[in-house]
Image (cartoon, rainbow, N blue to C red):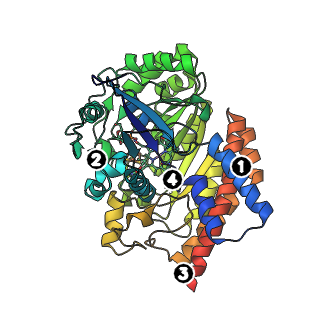
């Protein structure tokens, strides 16, 4: 596509590798610990396999942007988790997606690109929440969900009239028809490219989360027929598993029932994220199972109401959790149960109860996270006001993403010196090779994936323990 002057403008959309997950753990670990050549080779090989196998889904944000096509502008996606920056080519504009927690690498990259004469536009969660911190690092910033405004940015680029700021005043109307194209992606790099979002916004207000801050409290749905058409189109290019990225895929029971019933004839396999309330929605549970749901991540956070309530999470009462999870598994769907240890109601007695809960419910893949105060969330401000953050509140780099390797705050009822060993001893008991095999054997389906995830966690939580023990030694010295 060319403009009237015949010169095509070239845009590079960049997704940054975060210091998170395996990368975070192994990076932190190798930065300070001298390893033998063989063990560092082993960890690097494992890290590579895991990076490709587990988290390799493309950024939907950049797929959406690259599908907004403007005459005279071409767009390419560069996913830095797999690719090098293609700086041997000419680029007129680089768009970087900035996640809170990976701000430093994003700003470093912006500086590097601008020093080469490439204009930079920043967008994404961090820019939406902290625009004032981003202005000086870019030629333009986009505040908010950029689905529609991205067309205006490209038109301005083509006219040579880029504005310093684009602000989305009202949330985009998701019921308008839109096509998400995969043409800017290298499909082979990914585990699957079938990433679909049906709804934005979350009616809940958990204080450790910023989805409701970024996307609002009102659920905004796409039309069921548009989602079904997208699934049909996606299937033509990629027959692999679908990932419904919605934060709570069962939030609107009637909508979800219509959608997933409509998906039954497609015969796909899919995974997603839901609340445990699904276990009390039998008709929806049946529609999920019949439409090919293989596994759901459910945010349990705490098995204590007091801890959940201290963080404004009121929607999964503890007394109903066991039965709900068992019902989901009985319907043939694997459960990834995500816990947070270190919430304000938590005491040293909790780890034993979490372990027993995992056994009783038969959770297929447990994830035991440390509370991570993310700048821009309610809990971050509260901990800062209470003097409980371990870093200065405006030092956002210190609150980077990581995988349970470091404490960033002081728990309310447990000293750090007691908390760290209680957490590491819990993960050591829960994530063993023996438990991984046991969970895979009893999983309702997807046994090899359940085994892989559990083995991955044996490795990852091992790394996390090393980092946490180092932090403990530093605290004690
Ligand atoms: C799917 C998902 C994942 C997947 C896949 C990530 C991927 N490859 O895309 C996996 C499981 C790998 C993952 C990992 C992590 N995730 Co995650 N994830 C999500 C989830 C559920 C959906 C993301 C998504 O695709 N949304 C849909 C798109 C369309 O929305 P969007 O990304 O916000 O993009 C819009 C705007 O922000 C903007 N925009 C975005 N980028 C750009 C770039 C430009 C140039 C412009 C102009 C505009 C723009 O326009 C887009 C269209 O409207 C979100 C929750 C959510 N509701 O967003 C959490 C979320 C993004 N994840 C989160 C976290 C914390 C993590 C991890 C750190 C977890 C961990 N401890 O390891 C890692 C970090 C990984 C990384 N490298 O960034 C947090 C991020 C907090 C924050 N403020 O940044 C979120 C918001 C969840 C939460 N409850 O707080 N995640
Ligand atoms: S954690 Fe989940 S349920 Fe709670 S506000 Fe965030 S998206 Fe909503």
* Ligand 1 neighbours mark 4 (CB distance < 8 Å): yes
Task: State which mark lies toward you, 4 or 3.
Answer: 4
Residue 344, visible in the rendered structure: no
Label 2 Cα crowd, 10 Å radius (few <14 / some 14-19 / many 20+): many
Judged left or right of residue 416, residue 180 is left
* Disc 4 to disc 1, C-alpha distance: 22 Å
On the rendered structure, is 142 left or right of 294?
left
Alpha carbons under labels 1 and 3: distance apart:
30 Å
What whole-number distance in Å separates the C-alpha atoms at marks 2 and 4? 20 Å
- The circle on residue 475 is 3
**Residue at x 33% of width, y 70% of height:** 384
Q: Nearer the viewer, mark 4 or mark 1?
A: 4
Assess disc 4: are there few (<14), some (14-19) or many (≥20) residues with their C-alpha within 10 Å of its C-alpha.
many
Indicate the position of residue 196 as horizontal and vertical percent values. Answer: 46, 29
Residue 312, by quadrant, is bottom left
Picture quarter containing residue 150? top left
Q: Nearer the viewer, mark 2 or mark 4?
A: 2
Q: Is residue 63 left or right of residue 447?
A: left
Does residue 447 appear in this view?
Answer: yes
Residue 238, percent across and down?
58, 22
What residue did someone put label 2 on?
141
Task: State the residue position of label 1.
Answer: 455
Which of the two labelled residues, at mark 1 and mark 3, occupies the earlier sequence position?
A: 1
Q: Which mark is residue 18?
A: 4
Q: CA–CA distance between discs 1 and 2?
A: 41 Å
Q: Taking 360 as reference, is 248 above or below it?
A: above
Query: Which is nearer the N-term, disc 2 or disc 3?
Result: 2
């Amino acid at each position: 596509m060319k403009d009237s002057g015949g010169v095509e403008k070239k845009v590079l959309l960049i997704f940054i590798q975060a210091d998170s997950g395996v990368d975070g753990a192994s990076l932190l670990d190798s930065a300070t610990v001298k390893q033998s050549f063989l063990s560092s080779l082993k960890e690097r090989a494992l890290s590579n396999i895991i990076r490709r196998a587990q988290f390799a889904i493309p950024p939907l944000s950049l797929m959406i942007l690259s599908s907004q096509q403007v005459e005279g502008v071409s767009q390419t996606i560069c996913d830095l988790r797999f690719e090098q920056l293609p700086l041997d080519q000419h680029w007129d504009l680089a768009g970087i997606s900035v996640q809170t927690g990976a701000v430093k690498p994003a700003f470093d990259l912006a500086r590097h690109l601008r020093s080469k004469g490439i204009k930079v536009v920043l967008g994404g969660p961090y820019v939406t929440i902290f625009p004032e911190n981003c202005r000086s690092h870019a030629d333009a910033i986009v505040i908010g969900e950029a689905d529609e405004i991205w067309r205006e940015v490209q038109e301005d680029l083509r006219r040579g009239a880029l504005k310093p700021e684009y602000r989305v005043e009202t949330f985009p109307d998701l019921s308008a028809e839109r096509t998400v194209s995969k043409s800017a992606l290298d499909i082979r790099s990914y585990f699957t490219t079938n990433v679909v979002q049906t709804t934005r916004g979350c009616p809940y207000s958990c204080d450790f989360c910023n989805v409701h801050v970024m996307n609002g409290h009102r659920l905004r749905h796409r039309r069921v027929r548009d989602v079904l058409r997208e699934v049909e189109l996606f299937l033509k290019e990629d027959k692999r598993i679908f990932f419904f990225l919605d934060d709570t895929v069962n939030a609107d029971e009637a909508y979800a029932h219509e959608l997933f019933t409509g998906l039954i004839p497609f015969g796909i396999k899919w995974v997603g994220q839901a609340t445990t309330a699904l276990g009390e929605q039998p008709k929806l549970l049946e529609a999920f199972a019949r439409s090919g749901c293989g596994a759901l991540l459910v945010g349990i956070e705490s098995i204590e109401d007091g801890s959940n309530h201290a963080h404004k999470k009121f929607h999964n009462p503890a007394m109903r959790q066991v039965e709900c999870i068992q019902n989901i598994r009985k319907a043939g769907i694997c459960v990834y149960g995500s816990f947070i240890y270190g919430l304000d109601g938590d005491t040293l007695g909790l780890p034993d109860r979490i372990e027993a809960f995992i056994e009783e419910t038969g959770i297929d893949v447990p994830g035991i996270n440390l509370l991570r105060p993310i700048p821009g969330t309610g809990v971050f401000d509260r901990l800062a006001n209470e003097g409980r953050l371990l870093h200065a509140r405006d030092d956002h780099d210190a609150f980077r993403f990581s995988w349970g390797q470091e404490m960033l705050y002081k728990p309310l009822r447990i000293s750090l010196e007691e908390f760290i060993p209680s957490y590491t001893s819990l993960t050591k008991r829960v994530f063993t090779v023996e438990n991984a095999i046991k969970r895979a054997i009893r999983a309702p389906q997807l046994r090899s994936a359940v085994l892989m995830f559990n083995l991955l966690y044996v490795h990852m939580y091992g790394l996390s323990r090393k980092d946490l023990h180092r932090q403990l030694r530093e605290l004690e010295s």
